[in-house]
Image (cartoon, helix red, strand yellow):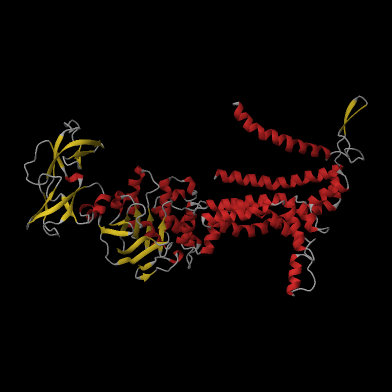
Amino acid sequence: MSWGRRSVIGVPYVWLTLFFLVPFVIVFKISFSEMAYAIPPYTQLMTWADQQWTLNLNLGNYYYLFTDDLYIRAYLSSIRIAGISTIICLLVAYPIAYAIARAEPATRNALLMLVILPSWTSFLIRIYAWVGILKNNGLINNFLMWLGIIDQPIAMLNTEFAVYIGIVYAYLPFMVLPLYTNLMKLDHSLLEAASDLGAPPWKVFFTVTLPLSKAGMVAGSMLVFIPAVGEFVIPDMLGGAETLMIGKVLWQEFFNNRDWPVASAVAIVMLLLLLLPIILFHRYQARELEN
Amino acid sequence: MTKSSQPMLEIRQVSKQFSGVSAVKDVNLSINKGEIFALLGGSGCGKTTLLRMLAGFETPSAGAIFIDGEDISEVPPHRRPVNMMFQSYALFPHMTVAQNVAFGLQQEKNRLSKPEIASKVAQLLGLVRMQDFASRRPEQLSGGQRQRVALARSLAKKPKVLLLDEPMGALDKKLRSQMQLEVVDIIEAVGVTCVMVTHDQEEAMTMADRISVMHEGEIMQVGTPNEIYEFPNSRHTAEFIGSVNIFDATVTQLEKDYSLLTCVDLNVPIQVEAGINAPIGASLGVAIRPEKITMSRQQPDQLVNWLMGVVEDIAYLGGHSVYYVKLTSGKRVMAIGTNNDRHEQKVTWKDTVYLHWSNTGAVVIYQ
């Protein structure tokens, strides 16, 4: 192999090793240590004493996660919230992607731009803007009270409802773009063929368009579901105290309790949980390639 | 094979404009039951637009389309008794061959039962000799196999009119000629009325009972392959179908048995069959197909219908050769010589030759 090829392949490998694998190994290592009032705030795995190395492997952090039901509830509610958000994203994004894919080429680019444009503003600011929209004396409540539809503000901020709005809003482009790419590739003559063979428009959609856009739906769902499970900013800013998500628990363990080992164990378990859909996704992709 | 003359498809004064540009202009056609009819023309001649109006993917800007006496101009594609075989075949990639063929049957209002559909699908796949491939996916098939499946799918609902869009467009040349005859056999076995679109005159002549030559949205001529080839009514048709030599000529003599014309490129008059529909002095075109011309080294002993020139180019095509002969006027004339003797002393470049033809070899063209 030439030097050029080696370096082209090597650079991303080095990057991933340095900034993904090494940190992961560190987190994995910390998850087996014990909390300590020290800097750094955990015990070393390997200690040198009495002329020999001792390995202190502490499985207690993992055991602890299963004894306190807070963690299990947080995992389950994260998966539930991420799952429901993914479904809502899919339902909202599909018509958007479909309309963009079917638009005239000139309008198509403008519409795509509109989907991507919000991402040019800081993520944090956009979520913060939702606080202003959803809070008790925020945009929606003030408007509804001004109209006289309600006389008491509706509590929207600091509810799960607000978290759904935040996640769907923030991750919608990640659903729209793969769906759009997929629907663009859809051969229009297939739709005409289905129609020619007697399928009314709704049936053309369900028998041809929808099954053929499965790859786009799977890709988009993965892009939304996986980061949404570990989402911290949105549940923290919009969900308030009553929304339980694993990202928030992780933050609290790490910064409030300064319990790095348990925080690391939480992160490792979350990764293992997310590995399952990722593996399924890869299997699906491999099968698609085979066909 | 006899065909009834009852019209199955009638196109009456159909026009289509796309944002002000005319794609199809005032087309009138009547297609008989059981007939294979070809719309032939170059790209952009409006043949595909016309076909898409028959399928219902486009609506005519003016005029009406009748199938079996019923006006279907406003009927959406999924309610028309018409099925189409697409140029790309448009087989559903996520379905097996059998599912593709069954798709149309599953859309019917009075749906057949599952075993009935299955037996119908098996029968259709048998018809196109694809019964062994029922559970394959389209991408596992060759081009010719895909075409058979597409044909079976478009025949499944027993359409009143079958539409073929460039049926051989996606096949290589060898397979094409084989499939042309096979597709015709299947269509005739089923007895369905068929309208096909093609830019390939050979394909149209092989497959169709009648051909309509289209040019710039208009129909130039409708007729059997033989009529279109031997009696073209316009310069465009004559040039589009096969090769032709066209001479600009003037009518000089109109007799009971023959007519004479003179041409500046020729030293002797051209004699054609009687019945020219023009007065003496009229300017016409005279079309002579290359295969109607005989080539010799000696001056022919006839007073009409010959010319002299120098061989400028020879295209050896195995079975025959095409000779390009340059006249003193500068005009080039094409002649075909059959290579029926391997040792024959060939006419070669720069040879002076005489080309002659009988008075039934040339045809007069008015426009």
Which residue is at 14% across, 53% downward?
B250
Residue A80 visible within the image: no
Q: Position of residue A185 (x, y in %)?
A: 53, 51
In the image, B188 versus B27, the foreground residue is B27
Q: Quadrant of the N terminus of chain B?
A: bottom left
In the image, B229 versus A137, the foreground residue is A137
Residue A154 visible within the image: yes
Q: Is residue A35 above or below residue A73?
A: above
Horizontal side, residue A127 vs residue B42: left or right: right
Q: Position of residue A287 (x, y in %)?
A: 59, 45
Residue at the limit of the structure toward the bottom, as seen here: A148
Which residue is at 88% across, 45% downward?
A258
Q: Position of residue A210 (x, y in %)?
A: 57, 57
Horizontal side, residue A145 vs residue B93: left or right: right
Q: Quadrant of the C terminus of chain B?
A: bottom left
Q: Is residue A201 above or below residue B284?
A: below
Q: Position of residue A253 (x, y in %)?
A: 85, 47
- Number of labelled discs? 0
Which residue is at 27% across, 64% downward?
B4
